Image: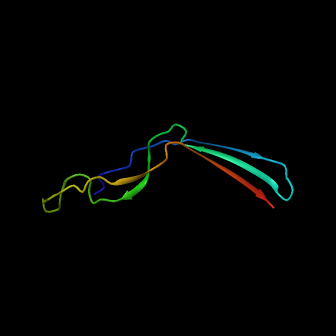
Amino acid sequence: MNDEKMPDYFTNSLGIGVRFKGVGFFKNPVFRLNANNLTGAFLRTGVASVVNNARETLGVYGNAIASSGGATYYLYPRFNITGTISSSF
């Protein structure tokens, strides 16, 4: 019925990386640190389950169509940090 929408949201991320000199057979090792959702905003990223209609509405022939309830959403983590170590050989 197109009677429900996901609310607007704002995310922010920060990425920092360091390259080191080669050590032994490790060539150009890199360490990366990524921080996501720095403000800890509560946001939804996608629809987990779909419903027919979120609000009661009238059908084509004037019949009332009951509400199916609201959709459920996937939630983005409040704040997270991820580290990565990589190297060429």
**Residue 81 percent coordinates (x, y):** 59, 45
Task: Name the residue: 84% across, 49% down.
Answer: 21
- Furthest-left residue in this view: 62
Q: Position of residue 44 (x, y in %)?
A: 43, 48
Q: Note whether 76 is above or below 52 in the view shown.
A: above
Image x and y of residue 89, in percent: 81, 61
- In the rendering, at what x and y percent does residue 61 appear? 13, 62
Q: Which of the 4 image quadrants contains residue 18?
A: top right
Colour convention of the picture: rainbow
| Left or right: where 26 falls relative to 83 | right
> Which is more toward the observer, 58 or 86?
86
Q: Residue furthest front?
A: 24
Quick one: which residue is furthest to the top in this view? Answer: 39
Viewer-proximal residue, 13 or 79? 79
Screen quadrant of the N terminus: bottom left
Residue drawn at x 44%, y 42% as measured from the top left: 42
Q: Quadrant of residue 46?
A: bottom left
- Seen at 69% across and 48% down, the residue is 32
Q: How many marks?
A: 0
Q: Is residue 11 left or right of residue 57?
A: right
